[in-house]
Amino acid sequence: MFDSGIGGLTVFQALREALPAAETLVYLGDTARVPYGTKSDETVIRYALEGARFLKRRGIKTLVIACNTMSAVALPALQREAALPVVGVIGPGAEAACRVTRRKAIGVIGTAATIKSGAYARAIATHLPDARVVSRPCPLFVPLAEEGWVDNDVARATATAYLGDLKHEGIDTLVLGCTHYPLLERVIGEAVGPGVTLVDSARATAKVVRARLEERGLLVAGAGPGAEGGDHFYVTDSSERFREVGSRFLGGPIARLEQIDIQG
Amino acid sequence: MFDSGIGGLTVFQALREALPAAETLVYLGDTARVPYGTKSDETVIRYALEGARFLKRRGIKTLVIACNTMSAVALPALQREAALPVVGVIGPGAEAACRVTRRKAIGVIGTAATIKSGAYARAIATHLPDARVVSRPCPLFVPLAEEGWVDNDVARATATAYLGDLKHEGIDTLVLGCTHYPLLERVIGEAVGPGVTLVDSARATAKVVRARLEERGLLVAGAGPGAEGGDHFYVTDSSERFREVGSRFLGGPIARLEQIDIQG
């Protein structure tokens, strides 16, 4: 799995729950260059390919792109160059939203780069061509979640500023199109009002990954721990903060964590 | 001049005003890896040295570090390795605060990395050993300024959350220890209350740079434009956003702007 930083741990957790214990997960977080959501497509694609190369050298059989921005912007390039199955979070998230919506009116929120890409709207259109999609970039939600301000005055004022007018758009479903956003679920829910179902791509993605592995006969059969006894985490900045915030995300310590360089 | 992104343009402007028109400024903004303020010292130092190497190859005679985080964390490494005069913003900012304070009670706000470094407190102590320094990291101010939310409910709630209790600390001076913070001057001023003087390091730094150049006989004498007719801007991410936001910062178009790679 590749993520721009720490947010992808929500996808890690969903994958861990969906996959047999014998599967080993290798997580790469590009914490030295996070965030990706405010950067240009060109730079995000370059960073995505560097990360994919690093993970391939670690012998992975499938690549999961946990970051919405990377999934929105770099998936075609990754699928062309990685030479192994690549699953992003946009397709599964869009499909889940299409299953949930009753009036075919879907809101999508994400980083500036994700929203600008139009990737969610395109993915939704492949399932529900007549769906109405209302998109909003919410760049401040990421630093808010990283600051731990998920349920205070600032979080509420931000959610109202970004989403208050969505109440008049008639949407019944809202895709949380960034791995950090589920942490702000409560204030986002308040801002859009009751009657709007929030969709988190993490679980939908985990199901798709499992199904793809099964289709290709790649799923490990056993129920015991992986051959090397556990998952591995790599980060590009100092591991200190990742260890601290990450164990909060996962509700337990992160055992195998290493700082590495993926540049160039 | 080297900055982590676009914020350093406030320092660029101050330098442009302080220096003869015949001096050419070369600005490097590492927009592909911004922000630095949430990253580890080790990573900030590595990036700082890469940027300094790039600028040296452009034939600069003095290096100005516009970014507070880089100045706080990487100045000793830069001074060791750059082999040319290096001026950061911390020393000049601290000195300006020491001149302004009446009760020797100084507040300092900045990124997490800047505050953790203790660089401002140390610099203040060299001028006023008995000054009391109260420091606060304000990580959300940078994304707020970049979002253009400098005078709305969210900005005010954020300033109150970070700075509301500074009112009871008895400070009479507050150092805006990040290039972005002057954009939020109004809400910051409201949060700390009247009677607190806000100090922006940019002007103080520009004066020091001019003085250093004069001391060493490096200041260009003429009043006309530089030999090559103007300043040069380099960025590491796409130049589109820099051009747009930058011309707002500078109140005019950015002429010579180029995207380059400084990695490795």
Image (cartoon, coloured by chain):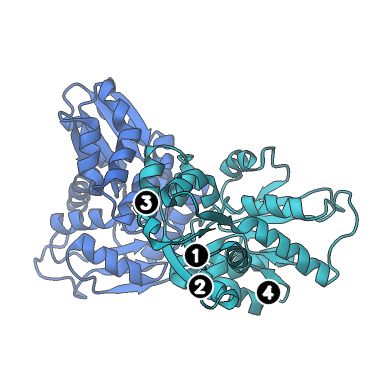
Chain colours: A cyan, B blue
- Cα–Cα gap, marks 1 and 2: 7 Å
Do marks 4 and 1 share a subunit? Answer: yes
The residue at which mark 1 appears reads as A106
Three-letter amino acid code of the residue under disc 3: Pro
The disc labelled 2 sits on which kind of residue? Answer: Ala
* Foreground: disc 1 or disc 3: 1
Note whether B196 is above or below A197 in the view shown. Answer: above
Q: Please, what secondary structure does the residue beneath circle 2 have? A: loop
Q: Which residue is mark 4?
A: A82
Secondary structure state at the residue bearing disc 3: helix
Sooner in the amino-acid sequence: mark 4 or mark 1? 4
Tell me the distance, in whole angstroms, between the alpha carbons under discs 1 and 3. 27 Å
Q: Compared to A81, does A38 lie above or below?
A: above
Q: Which mark is residue B143?
A: 3
Q: Does label 2 lie on the same chain as label 1?
A: yes
Circles 2 and 3, Cβ within 8 Å, touching? The answer is: no
